[in-house]
């Protein structure tokens, strides 16, 4: 591949040509390391145009990338911004990343639970877009709580409290920020090499020692297909490991909403129940499984995670974490102005509750946003009263829609058409954690 001449008068000094890079991938070739690094760097500098990067992303979606290309792509995106370091902290740092789902509030109880064992958890999180909620949106239900921290504040909180959940600064992997926005509008989000390099560039740049990935499959997940989710998990574990970040992944079921709440304030309430030693069984199971993985990577494979939920240590860490970011852990959470409860039409067993339509319905109720600049309504969402496997009698409440405006109920109910089923036989039980993936 040789010097480019097409884009601007400066093209003569650019060492590669975007069109050559695109053609290589279009024709099933492997893009050489220096050309791929240049492509990402030139895109960040706005020398490579959005149209060219979109064509490249589509070629990657159709023709894939080999392990070396994915590693180089990740590395180039890391190099586009700052790289954080927690080296002076004197504690092991372990982060968790979930590929996102419906009712997935696990980060909230998990970060303080792991911090209760003296491990630092730097959880740089995002806001929700579409049907999957954002951790920051949930926490902003807590009066006073602040998502934006400077790097110094984050470091001090990790040292003093152990757990931080805050907004990722714009300095981490800026190339990914541009590329992700472009993928969103060009039908190229679903490419495994692009998802893996996008997620892992931010996690590696964040400077964590270790990382546990919760890679979800099923109707409410990014990857519906379990084999694709497994491939994504393996790709990310390999990327983390190759970069010196100890990484493992759990492959988890996202066909049914997690827990009994979908929204923001109601998900915080449920997380606090888990920290108080209660909460729905699936939330407790996944929180404990992920905490065990994180603590094993931090050198504590025998930590008694359940004990820390029972005896209040995790709750103490939660309260400290919320207070450190100006939140009031005792303040009442927002409540909805309007509610609408759906009841069972007949006796039987709840056989199915489909995650995706419930996520979409919660979003239409105002719990999520359609555009990045929209606000969310913290009290909006859905409270579930039963989960699949429960025996049902006619007239029994199944779930309650929560909103600030009753005009939202109709479209939410449209989304829920056919999303649950009452039958005669209990559904076969399926494991929540299907597989553990290691390097
Ligand atoms: N989350 C990310 O950060 N990037 C992706 O590509 C997909 C999900």
Image (cartoon, helix red, strand yellow):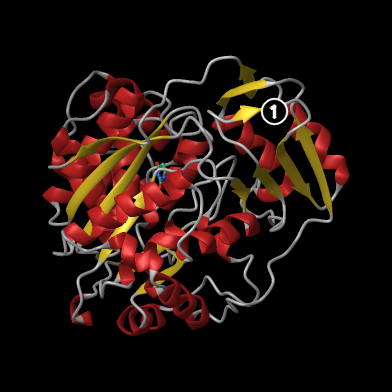
On the question of residue 14 being in view, the answer is no
Q: Nearer the viewer, residue 203 or 419?
A: 419
Residue 166 image position (x, y, % from top left): 46, 68
Residue 426 image position (x, y, % from top left): 51, 20
Q: Nearer the viewer, residue 171 or 313?
A: 313
Query: Does mark 1 have its CB less than 8 Å from ligand 1?
Result: no
Identify the residue at the far top of this view.
424
Quadrant in the rendering for residue 222: top left
Residue 67 image position (x, y, % from top left): 15, 35
Ligand 1 quadrant in view: top left
Q: Is residue 295 above or below residue 155?
A: above
Residue lying at 60% horizontally and 61% vertically, measured from the top left: 269
Quadrant in the rendering for residue 230: top left
Residue lying at 51% horizontally and 57% vertically, measured from the top left: 135
Q: Is residue 187 above or below residue 348?
A: below
Q: Which residue is mark 1?
A: 416
Q: Nearer the viewer, residue 43 or 96?
A: 96
Q: Position of 6 compared to 184: left or right?
A: left
On the question of residue 346 being in view, the answer is yes
Q: Position of 310 compared to 419: left or right?
A: left
Q: Position of 229 compared to 140: left or right?
A: left
Q: Is residue 423 above or below residue 324?
A: above
Number of labels in the image equals 1
Q: Quadrant of the C terminus?
A: top left
Q: Residues within 10 Å of mark 1 (few under 14, many from 20)?
A: some
Q: Secondary structure at mark 1?
A: loop
Residue 111 image position (x, y, % from top left): 38, 64
Q: Nearer the viewer, residue 118 or 36?
A: 118
Residue lying at 30% horizontally and 57% vertically, measured from the top left: 291
Q: Quadrant of the N terminus?
A: top left
Q: Position of 276 compared to 377: left or right?
A: left
């Amino acid at each position: 591949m040789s010097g480019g001449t097409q884009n601007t008068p400066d093209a003569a000094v650019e060492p590669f040509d975007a069109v050559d890079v695109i053609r290589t991938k279009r024709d099933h070739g492997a893009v050489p390391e220096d050309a791929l690094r240049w492509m990402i760097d030139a895109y960040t500098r706005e020398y490579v145009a959005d149209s060219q990067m979109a064509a490249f992303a589509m070629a990657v979606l159709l023709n894939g990338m080999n392990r070396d290309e994915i590693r180089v792509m990740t590395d180039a995106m890391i190099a586009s911004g700052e790289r954080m370091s927690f080296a002076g902290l004197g504690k092991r740092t372990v982060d968790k990343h979930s590929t996102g789902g419906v009712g997935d509030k696990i980060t909230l109880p998990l970060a303080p639970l792991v911090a209760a064992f003296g491990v630092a958890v730097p959880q740089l999180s995002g806001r929700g877009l579409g049907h999957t909620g954002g951790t920051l949106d949930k926490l902003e239900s807590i009066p006073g709580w602040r998502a934006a921290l400077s790097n110094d504040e984050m470091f001090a909180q990790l040292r003093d409290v152990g757990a931080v959940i805050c907004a990722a600064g714009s300095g981490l992997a800026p190339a990914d920020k541009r590329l992700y926005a472009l993928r969103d509008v060009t039908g190229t989000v679903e490419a495994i090499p692009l998802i893996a390099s996008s997620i892992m560039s931010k996690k590696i740049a964040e400077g964590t020692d270790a990382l546990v990935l919760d890679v979800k499959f099923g109707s409410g997940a990014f990857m519906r297909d379990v084999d694709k989710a497994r491939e994504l998990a393996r790709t990310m574990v390999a990327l983390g490991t190759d970069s010196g970040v100890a990484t493992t992944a759990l492959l988890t079921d996202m066909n049914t909403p997690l827990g009994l709440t979908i929204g923001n304030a109601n998900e915080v309430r449920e997380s606090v129940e888990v920290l108080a030693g209660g909460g729905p069984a699936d939330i407790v199971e996944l929180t404990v499984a992920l905490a065990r993985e994180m603590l094993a990577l931090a050198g504590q494979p025998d930590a008694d995670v359940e004990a820390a939920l029972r005896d209040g240590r995790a709750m103490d860490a939660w309260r400290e974490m919320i207070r450190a970011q100006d939140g009031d852990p005792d303040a009442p959470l927002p409540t909805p102005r309007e509610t609408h409860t759906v009841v069972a039409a007949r006796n039987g067993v709840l056989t199915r509750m489909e995650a995706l339509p419930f996520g979409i319905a919660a979003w239409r109720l105002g719990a999520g946003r359609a555009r990045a600049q929209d606000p969310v309504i913290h009290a909006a969402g859905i409270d579930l009263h039963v989960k699949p496997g429960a025996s049902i009698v006619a007239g029994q409440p199944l779930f309650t829609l929560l909103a600030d405006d009753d005009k939202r109920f109709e479209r939410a109910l449209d989304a829920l058409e056919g999303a649950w089923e009452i039958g005669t036989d209990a559904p076969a039980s399926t494991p929540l954690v299907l597989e553990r993936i290691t390097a």
